[in-house]
């Protein structure tokens, strides 16, 4: 493994650890509107977009395990979901979209809608809840997660900085 890849892996692990600590210690106790923001899926989308499909899938797997352990009640939902979404964001970043902030906003928005929708669907199957209430909770969760968009993008770009230098050298 190259030194740049190891440096990126350690930086991404640090970003994920900080996000986990933030989500588990602070955000899980502060629940305005009876909803909790989900910053970890944003990290998976950013890692996929900036690092490619393989890195997005591997980081999505780690982020999903962390997210499932943080939430505790979702089983393997986020482990599977974030692995697939991280890979998909990486695929989109490699072949279709640019690796810029507008692309991240599009992909992270889609990632959040899918994650909150699947979480609501699972909850609705376990505990019969009116669809209106599930949709309102999803909307609240999306609104509460919006302030984490830019910090997630900046942190993951910082973590992937060593890889960007390698890409520039290989193009020359």
Image: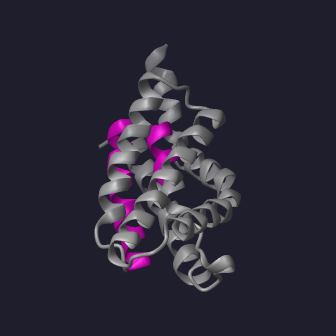
Percent of width and height locating residue 35: 60, 75
Q: Residue furthest top?
A: 172
Q: Residue furthest bottom?
A: 29
Say left or right for 60 vs 76. right
Quarter of the figure with residue 29: bottom right
Say left or right for 100 vs 171. right
Percent of width and height locating residue 45: 49, 47
Which residue appears at 49% of the width and 49% of the height?
111
Can the viewer see residue 11?
no
Whether residue 92 is situated above or below residue 89 in the rendered picture: above
Q: Which secondary structure is most common in the magenta stretch?
A: helix
Q: Nearer the viewer, residue 126 or 93?
A: 126
Which residue appears at 49% of the width and 38% of the height?
49
Percent of width and height locating residue 82: 38, 54
Magenta residues span 44-72
Which residue appears at 62% of the width and 61% of the height?
139
Can the viewer see residue 15?
yes
> What's the coloring here?
one colour
Percent of width and height locating residue 3: 39, 44
**From the image, which quarter does the N terminus lie in?**
top left
Total marks in image = 0
The question of residue 139 being in magenta is answered with no
Whether residue 118 is situated above or below residue 30 in the rendered picture: above
Which residue appears at 65% of the width and 83% of the height?
30
Whether residue 96 is situated above or below residue 75 in the rendered picture: above
Q: Nearer the viewer, residue 121 or 63?
A: 121
Quarter of the figure with residue 151: bottom right
């Amino acid at each position: 493994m190259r030194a740049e890849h190891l440096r990126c892996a350690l930086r991404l692990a640090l970003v994920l650890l900080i996000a986990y600590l933030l989500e588990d210690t602070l955000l899980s106790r502060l629940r305005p509107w009876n909803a909790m923001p989900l910053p970890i899926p944003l990290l998976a989308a950013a890692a996929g977009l900036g690092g490619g499909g393989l890195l997005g899938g591997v980081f999505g797997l780690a982020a999903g395990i962390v997210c499932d352990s943080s939430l505790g009640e979702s089983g393997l939902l986020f482990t599977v979901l974030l692995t697939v979404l991280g890979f998909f964001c990486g695929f989109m970043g490699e072949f279709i979209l640019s690796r810029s902030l507008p692309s991240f906003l599009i992909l992270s928005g889609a990632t959040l809608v899918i994650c909150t929708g699947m979480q609501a669907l699972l909850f609705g199957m376990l505990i019969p809840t009116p669809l209106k209430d599930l949709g309102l909770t999803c909307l609240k969760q999306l609104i509460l997660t919006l302030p984490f968009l830019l910090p997630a993008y900046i942190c993951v770009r910082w973590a992937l900085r060593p890889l960007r230098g390698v890409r520039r050298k290989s193009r020359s």
